[in-house]
Amino acid sequence: MTKALRTALLAIVALAFAGCADDKIDVNAAGPGKADSYFVIGISPEQTRVVIFDGRISHGAFYQNDRLHVYLSKDGFIIGHISEGDTSGVTLLDIKHAMPDRNMGTHGDSGLAHWLLDPRAPTDFSPCANGAPTLTFSAPPGHVYYLSSLALRIEPGSHTPFDDHLGFHITKDLEAARAFLKADYPQLADKLEQGHFDMTPAGKCF
């Protein structure tokens, strides 16, 4: 990703977030409609902005379209909806306003906190820009799915500390996701089930 593209995408994210463009689920929601599903993804650190684009899989790669969704992690998770027949991909994680977990990072307990204090360090991670696959998913309608949990961390550089960069690792904790729903979306908790996702190379995305 070029600096100009990164700047443009972050500007779009800021405008979308300011305009409440994220797909908010009502806290009293009893479940999705007949034509869509709800998804839950674990995200840390807290207050990470997550950009998800709709798109398609073609020849084994994810190609985004212009339908953008922006979420802010709360209590370690995001929740959104996906329509029947759609495929979506996580294309950007932005920790500019995040609240670091002291145990994250590779340079001691406060590695990520130190990273955020360095004005030279980028605060966004795009799988596309880093040559990494992106998390993609689709879902049959009428369900509430937990996909996985993504934890941002500092990845050590191959040569010097100046090569360090943001990355993430993936875990699964269905019961933690259920506890999140019980606290914030109580009518959805008992409906939660494990969903499926793929790690797909990026064909076209920011």
Image (cartoon, grey):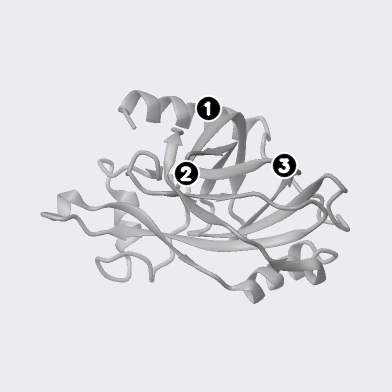
Answer above or below: position of 93 versus 153.
above
Mark 3 and mark 1 residues within 8 Å of each other at the beta carbon: no
Disc with the residue nearer the chain's start (2 vs 3): 2
55 and 42: which one is in front?
Answer: 55
Q: Nearer the viewer, mark 1 or mark 2?
A: 2
Q: CA distance from mark 2 to mark 3?
A: 17 Å
Disc with the residue nearer the chain's start (1 vs 2): 1
- State the image coordinates of residue 66 (x, y, percent, origin top left): 59, 27
How many callouts does the rendering have? 3
Residue beneath the point at 81% across and 64% down? 188
Most extreme residue toward the front is 59
- State the image coordinates of residue 190 (x, y, percent, origin top left): 81, 71
Residue type at the position of mark 2 = Gly
29 and 137: which one is in front?
Answer: 137
Residue type at the position of mark 3 = Gly
- Return the residue at label 1: 12
Quadrant of res 174:
bottom right
- State the image coordinates of residue 18 (x, y, percent, origin top left): 62, 32
Residue beneath the point at 88% across and 58% down? 30
47 and 206: which one is in front?
Answer: 206
Residue beneath the point at 81% across and 67% down? 191
- Return the residue at label 3: 85
